[in-house]
Image (cartoon, helix red, strand yellow):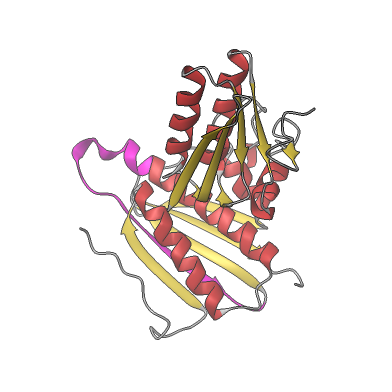
Amino acid sequence: MPETTVPGPDAGDENRVELSAPATPEMMHLVHAVLEQLWSQHEDVSMVDRMRFEMAVIEILGNIVEHAYAMESGGTERRFDVRLTATDAALVASFGDDGMPNTIDLSDVAMPDEEAESGRGLALAMAAVDDLTYDRSAGRNHWRLTCLRQPG
Amino acid sequence: MIEFAVDTTPEGIGVVTPKGRLNMSSARGLKEILDGLVSDGTSKIVVDLAETTFLDSSGLGALIAGLKAARQSGGDLRVARPTEAVLTVFKLTNLDRVLRPRDSVEGAFDA
């Protein structure tokens, strides 16, 4: 089992939780758990903000996992790391991963029609949060999503 | 983590209750259950979402796939009692019309 790190609340900055793990669907529940840890440290975050942030975080993770698998022919394990930060003003998630580059232009992302069985992930993430950025540098993908906190 | 409860009513309606989070790692399980019901001849299905605490685009995809399979077999798939988190996803994706939430499992096929 590859190393998975989930720092406890005593790991330093209580505004921040971090996770580094293999980019596989099974890691979804770990990210949900890390979010629960963040909320337990920030009980003042409203349910609406928790919901839209979690929604976007999970969609971006889904995108990372898909692209990680797309590159897996060589058998190299792909990993991602994520840092989740809560302040009085905003909730921020920063992802890094070594999967395939993402070729989607975020300005072109639109919700597919009702009959579509896939293709809603990024559109849903963008609808849920206030800002979503993607860039590729040093052979890694970087996603950052920001949810401005609304008065509870 | 997720569990699925699957029942059939005396009227022959399949009732599927996902208990937990429907995300990329659990949506496949829902799709298999819905496909199984339809291929076994149960084409009227209610998905009871009262215990579904989270839904992502993969879970939505499984619901839409189930809806299409049920309709192709002459039935339908209806959703009942969504939690607020699930309802928010329906609205953000404009699927609250095609997946119109019903107030109860028993009455999901009344109208």
Image height check: is A131 above or below B5? below
Task: Using residue A27 as the reference point, say whether residue B72 is left or right of it.
Answer: right
Q: Compared with residue A132, is residue B56 higher up or lower down, i.e. above or below?
A: above
| Image location of residue A33, percent across then percent down | 45, 65
Tell me the quarter of the picture where residue A47 sits. Answer: bottom right
Which residue corresponds to the image point at 22% horizontal and 59% vertical from the top-left?
A2
Question: Can residue A113 be seen?
Answer: yes
Q: Position of residue B51 (x, y in %)?
A: 58, 52
Q: Is residue A51 magenta?
A: no
Whole-percent x and y of residue B35?
47, 24
In the picture, residue A116 is in which quadrant?
top right
Magenta range? A67-88
Asked whether, in this view, residue A77 is left or right of residue A52, the answer is left
| Residue A119 shows in this picture | no
Residue B50 percent coordinates (x, y): 63, 50
Which residue appears at 35% of the width and 50% of the height?
Answer: A26
Query: In the displayed image of the protein, which residue is found farthest to the right?
Result: B111
Q: How many marks?
A: 0
Q: Nearer the viewer, residue B38 or A44?
A: B38
Does the magenta portion include A86?
yes
Residue lying at 29% horizontally and 49% vertically, measured from the top left: A78
Q: Work out which quarter of the rendered image holds the C terminus of chain B and state it.
A: top right
Residue in the picture at 64% in, 63% down = A147
Location of residue A113 with respect to B56 vertically, above or below: above
- Comparing A44 with B48, the one in front is B48
